[in-house]
């Protein structure tokens, strides 16, 4: 995705509200495109990041495109994933 292009979104109003709150284009689109029946619910079937190994956290960070991940500690990887 080009830096100047906005991602495709299902819920335009929600996307714009999230952008106004300061969320990234990527995160706003991800939330606006999520199934409305799960939006706002916390918790899931995955274990907490703290229970993941650093190697698994690194792989997930790579998958979602977090930069400078090779220099991050486990704690920094967790923080980066939560804020991505």
Image (spheres, rainbow, N blue to C red):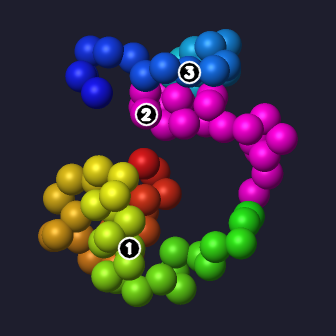
Per the model, the C-alpha gap separating discs 1 and 2 is 20 Å
Q: Is residue 38 above or below residue 76?
A: above
Q: Residue at x 43, y 68 (%)?
A: 78
Q: Is residue 31 magenta?
A: yes
Q: Residues within 10 Å of mark 2 (few under 14, many from 20)?
A: some
Q: Which residue is mark 1?
A: 57
Q: Residue at x 43, y 59 (%)?
A: 81
Nearer the N terminus, badge 3 or badge 1? 3
Task: Please state if 45 lies on the left or on the right of 54 as rendered.
Answer: right
Magenta residues? 22-42
Q: Which residue is mark 2?
A: 26
**Which numbered circle lies on residue 9?**
3
Q: Position of residue 45 (x, y in %)?
A: 71, 72
Q: Is residue 23 above or below residue 4?
A: below
Task: Please state if 17 lies on the left or on the right of 52 as rendered.
Answer: right
Q: Position of residue 58 (x, y in %)?
A: 30, 72
Q: Position of residue 9 (x, y in %)?
A: 56, 21
Q: Position of residue 84 (x, y in %)?
A: 42, 48
């Amino acid at each position: 995705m080009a830096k100047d292009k906005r991602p495709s979104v299902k819920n335009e109003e929600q996307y714009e509200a999230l952008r106004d709150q300061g969320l990234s284009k990527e995160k706003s689109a991800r939330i606006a495109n999520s199934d409305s029946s799960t939006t706002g619910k916390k918790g899931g079937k995955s274990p907490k990041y703290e229970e993941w190994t650093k190697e698994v956290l690194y792989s997930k960070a790579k998958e979602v495109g977090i930069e400078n991940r090779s220099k991050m500690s486990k704690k920094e990887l967790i923080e980066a994933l939560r804020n991505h």
